[in-house]
Image: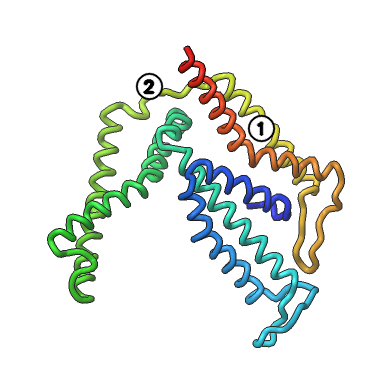
Amino acid sequence: MFFLHPVCLIVSLIGAAAYSIYLNGKKALRFQLVFLLPMMLMAAVVNPAFNHEGATILTYLPTGNPLTLESMVYGLAAAVMMASVVIWFSCYHAVMTSDKFVYLFGRIIPALSLVLSMTLRFVPKFKAQFRVVSDAQKCVGRDLSNGGVIQRLRNGITILSIMLTWALENAIETADSMKSRGYGLPGRTAFSIYHFDQRDKSALIWLAFCGIYILSGWAVGTLEWRYYPTIKGVERTPFSVSFQLVYLALCLTPVVLNRVEDRKWVHLRGDCEKG
């Protein structure tokens, strides 16, 4: 979100798209083509229509405002950045389950981690429950597709009331259940299948190295890029390229790690079958 250098934007989009396709397959590809691509095109078109900054005037719009090259390039860069952020968050949602979040922050911030965990689970559970309620109302003729406009509005309000009641009741039951189990009390232990081993240490060291290296490059200005009033960036040198390569390695780290683990798993299964 903070690196508007074209190379960083393209690298981030490629890394996010590759990891999203690895996690969700054709569903992720369909989401990128059906939703993100039109959103990117809209953002790229809207910016030059309302932003007229820039020194390179290409033509004039019917309103008399200039259409500049800089505004078009910045709109495209903003569209790529927006798409990258959305895809990365979709990857986070697929990987970071509620039990992982509670494992990481349950002892440090027990109350906040519980609230955030419930928030992450709320949307998929709400969608599933909404389908159940809609199907039940449809069986008795009270669905959103039955009757006139007024009747549909009443049916929608009924379904919304049912969903709000379910959400509040579910939150209270979860809170009472966690409280009865002593969640957040000092000295309370919890079972977890996760353990911080040598692989985690190696990954953490690698991520820390990449993060510190990239931040140092940003601090000294090797990743700076401006779009107004003219397009200009830092001169390309081996030193500046090194930060871009590290950024590429960081964005591809999730895919590489998963592919390596997949190969290990296939190799182990082959050994077991032979044995």
Looking at the image, residue 2 sits to the left or right of residue 19; the answer is right
Question: So how many labels did they put on this image?
Answer: 2
Which colour style is shown? rainbow
Whether 51 is drawn above or below 231: the answer is below
Local SS, label 1: helix
Whether 15 is drawn above or below 72: the answer is above
Where residue 156 appears, as percent x and y from the top left, is: 24, 65
Earlier residue among tags 2 and 1: 2
Label 2 packing within 10 angstroms: few (<14), some (14-19), many (20+): few
Label 1 packing within 10 angstroms: few (<14), some (14-19), many (20+): few
Looking at the image, residue 125 sits to the left or right of residue 65; the answer is left
Where residue 66 appears, as percent x and y from the top left, is: 72, 81
Give whichever of 169, 257 is nearer the camera. Answer: 257
| Residue displayed at 82% across by 45% down | 240
Where residue 40 appears, as percent x and y from the top left, is: 58, 63
The amino acid beneath tag 2 is Phe
Whether 234 is drawn above or below 100: the answer is below
The amino acid beneath tag 1 is Ala
According to the picture, the residue beneath numbered tag 1 turns out to be 208
Looking at the image, residue 239 sits to the left or right of residue 94; the answer is right
Mark drawn on residue 191:
2
Instruction: Give me the C-alpha separation between circle 2 and circle 1.
Output: 28 Å
Give whichever of 27, 35 is nearer the camera. Answer: 27
Residue sitting at the far top: 275
| Residue displayed at 20% across by 76% down | 148
Residue sitting at the far front: 274
Whether 203 is drawn above or below 55: the answer is above
Please tell me in which quadrant of the rendered image residue 138 appears: bottom left
Where residue 159 appears, as percent x and y from the top left, is: 22, 60
Local SS, label 2: loop
Looking at the image, residue 94 sits to the left or right of residue 155; the answer is right
